[in-house]
Amino acid sequence: MIVKTYGSAVQGVAAITITLEVNVAPKGTKFYIVGLPDNAVKESQRRIESAIIDLGCKMPRLRTVVNMAPADIKKAGSAYDLPIALGIIAASKQMPADKLADYIIMGELSLDGTLQPIKGALPIAIQARKDGFKGLILPKQNAREAAMVNELEVYGVSHMREVIHFFEQPQSLQPVIVDTRQEFLAAQADFDVDFADVKGQYNIKRALEIAAAGGHNVILIGPPGAGKTMLAKRFPTILPPLSLNEALETTKIHSVAGKLPAHTSLIARRPFRSPHHTVSDTALVGGGSIPQPGEISLAHNGVLFLDELPEFRRKVLEVMRQPIEERLVTISRAKAIIDYPSNFLLLAAMNPCQCGFYNHSEKDCTCPPGAVQKYLNRVSGPLLDRIDLHVEVTPTPFSALSSTEETEKSESIRERVIKAREIQTARFADHAGIYCNAQMNSHLLRTICTPDQEGATLLKKAMDFMKLSARAYSRILKVSRTIADLEGSEQIQTPHLAEAIQFRSLDKEKWGG
């Protein structure tokens, strides 16, 4: 007897429905799994057999063939245990098979039939609804995540016995219901830190406000203890909130990677990823024998913070150049090409030299001649060109640290950022894939960021004096457009350009001696 059950394979951040055909025939005694399964799928026979016997059912001692279609797609992982087991039980006439075709079923089996959580529940649920399935059955730990998808019945189970009982008595399980919008709104502004905690550093706060308003990449350069990391960790508190679509897209990536926080069904705040400087290029960009999203994709719609930037291996930093520009990373393998979104804001921090005190107002730099330039050269010029704001961080004086005066809260800064983003949303409404000033292409740059005569003269002098590249020129124009948006100005004025130019610290001749 042939029985069909349905599962799902995750490729990139999307899912593909997999048909599992189980045939229990009277001739022969062997067990076969075909359809390009990996070792985890092949090993499922022992888990399935143990779970079926523990359930009180019989594992058929007949020729059993499991075909996973389409056969040219690699089937990886242990999440197919449950649909295969149910197919075997139904094909051997130990449970009804008439309703199996209505549901996508996924779950890894323990030897006693309990279910272990799976990866990629959200994209699986999205594809199940798209393909017209009535519902989705999966481990209880993944149920709330999958229930974010409306118009799909999602059942969370902890044991295979519950699934069999459900197909015999459908009223035995109730679908999991999640109010997606309410849960999303409740978690949006839940931050443990605030810019009000930072004393002084008004110019740095201003630079980060501009970066948040326009989606610009930032690098903070300053001595140890000046507050670079503290400011960076508070940066997400002034970013505009995620839209619901962005939240779902971000959750999909974390779900596929198995990085969704416990007891969280939806990522409602912009991600803040801070990998250690020993990270490999594969861990940062993504890939592996079984391709997985890297840190730059986990930071999608959020912030990638690289502390101690020159300490990262040069090869690791260079592989980011294309994703920064394209906002997409492509993982190419012999049998598959997978795209992961990587629309992140790069926030980096670094010391100005090996000892950390080059250009310090009070302490002397102890680095030998040429060492400062050698240290800066660890970060390539093309990568620095892709960073819009170079911000010099100086130590906070005692008078500011000991002041009892209240400083501006993140909420106030965030309101200005949101207003500036609303201006940009309206501006780019007719341009697909462009949502903020940092994403402008060269055509939009020419039409939207044209300075007046006085501003053009100032920009020419800065280009000649600082020997800026064409990319740096476009970055200055984009930043000045954001500064104008923060002030509600329709035109880029000379003061806007002047402020944007002064945020190119690493282009100044004094750096590196």
Image (cartoon, rainbow, N blue to C red):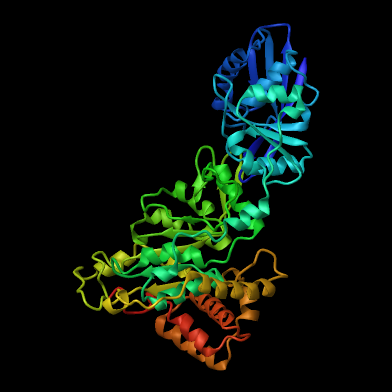
Residue sitting nearer the eye, 329 or 60: 60
Q: Quadrant of residue 314?
A: bottom left
- Up the image or down, 120 lies above or below 407; here it is above
Residue 416 seen: yes
For residue 305, side relative to residue 80 (left or right): left
- Up the image or down, 72 lies above or below 509; here it is above
Taking the spot 67% from the left edge, 10% from the top edge, the residue there is: 60
Count of labels in the image: 0
Taking the spot 62% from the left edge, 43% from the top edge, the residue there is: 145
Q: Position of residue 90 (x, y in %)?
A: 73, 18
Residue sitting nearer the eye, 103 or 20: 103
Q: Position of residue 107 (x, y in %)?
A: 61, 30
Residue 471 seen: no
Q: Residue furthest front?
A: 404
Q: Position of residue 14 (x, y in %)?
A: 65, 44
Q: Quadrant of residue 444?
A: bottom right
Taking the spot 25% from the left edge, 78% from the top edge, the residue there is: 361
Q: Quadrant of the N terminus?
A: top right
Q: Quadrant of residue 404?
A: bottom left
Q: Residue furthest right?
A: 98
Q: Position of residue 350 (x, y in %)?
A: 35, 65
- Up the image or down, 254 lies above or below 69; here it is below
Q: Quadrant of the C terminus?
A: bottom left
Taking the spot 67% from the left edge, 43% from the top edge, the residue there is: 147
